[in-house]
Image (cartoon, rainbow, N blue to C red):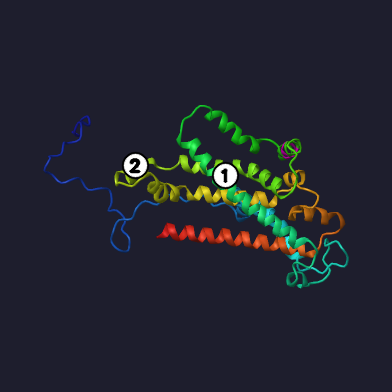
Amino acid sequence: MPAADHPAGPPPSRHPGSPPAASAGPPEKSATGSPEKPRKPKKPEKPPAARSRRSPLRWVRENAVVLAGCAALVYLLLPNLVILLFSFNEPAGRFNYSWRAFSADAWTDPCGVAEMCGSLRLSLRIAILATLLATVFGTLAAFALARYRFRGRSTANALIFLPMAMPEVVMAASLGTLFLNMRVQFGFVTILIAHVMFCLSFVVVAVKARVMSMDPRLEEAARDLYAGPFQTFLRVTLPLAAPGIAAGALLSFALSFDDFIITQFNAGPSTVTFPMFVWGAAQRGVPVQVNVIGSAMFVLAVALVVCGQFVTNRRRKS
């Protein structure tokens, strides 16, 4: 008789010490003998045409900040480069607005135009004196506003910011009216006073920001080492505040040398600064020597910035 069918029971249990059951087949091995890892399916590549269409826009988005910075730099430098180029021009008439021929005659004789170098020397004198006075008074005011608490401090801060907030022509007209009421003769002194008052605010802001960011523990450490107040100020405080003082002084010089509106309102009939000379020359034809002076100042400013950056980088590395 055929054997009776028995119902399938659970698989026989394996003893803990028995070896594992063999798999269906041995794992595939590579050429070195190690088992190969399972490979992930590759993503479908985009066609080259689609990649080429999207890559320029993606590159522009990734470098948008750099492109905007380069565009701003070109926008700022382009007028100076045009002035530098036309300083080597040989114009046919009084106006130096179209290129005619290359010539270096203006560079060999920059003072060939009457009264131009005299006005340049006057502007330099006013700018240097205004910078010195504004830097001294502005530094003292900045230390007072940053280090001391006194009655009227908020009002003094507001008054310091007024020349920066109001239009320049308002300050120029106000000073001119003041000098007229005081019966002061317009000339070198009135221009100098007006420039000092105009530049003072910028020095105070630059120095005050630097003083407020200084660590007071450095001065306390100097006093703990038996340094007197004057010695502490001279050897610790002043070197720490020097970058702010230098920034305020450079800004004052640039503003004073370049100013036209305040000078026009407070200058006498015989006092002509370099900006006033350029404005007057533009009415009847700008000589090439004006481009030469402008190019020389531009090159000097760039050289000062590069030297300052070089010195700063060397100090950081050392």
Corner quadrant of residue 178:
top right
Q: Amino acid at mark 1?
A: Val
Residue at image point 72% right, 44% down: 262
Picture coordinates of residue 237, whole percent (x, y) = 42, 46
Number of residues whose C-alpha sits closer than 10 Å to that of mark 1, classed few (under 14), some (14–19) or many (20 or more): many
Q: Main secondary structure of the magenta part?
A: helix
Q: Quadrant of the C terminus?
A: bottom left
Q: Which region is colored magenta?
A: 172-176
The secondary structure type at the circle numbered 2 is helix
Q: Amino acid at mark 2?
A: Glu
Q: Earlier in the sequence, mark 2 or mark 1?
A: 1
Q: CA distance from mark 2 to mark 1?
A: 26 Å
Q: Is residue 215 left or right of residue 100?
A: left
Residue at image point 83% right, 63% down: 98
The secondary structure type at the circle numbered 1 is helix
Number of residues whose C-alpha sits closer than 10 Å to that of mark 2, classed few (under 14), some (14–19) or many (20 or more): few
What residue sits right under mark 1 in the picture?
A: 203
Residue at image point 64% right, 38% down: 164
Q: Is residue 237 left or right of residue 20?
A: right
Per the image, is 174 magenta? yes
What residue sits right under mark 2 in the picture?
A: 220
Q: Quadrant of the N terminus?
A: top left
Picture coordinates of residue 67, whole percent (x, y) = 62, 52
Q: In this orientation, which residue lies closer to the viewer: 170 or 13?
A: 170
Per the image, is 178 magenta? no
Picture coordinates of residue 41, whole percent (x, y) = 45, 49
Whether residue 58 is visible: no
Picture coordinates of residue 104, whole percent (x, y) = 75, 72
For residue 235, above or below residue 14:
below
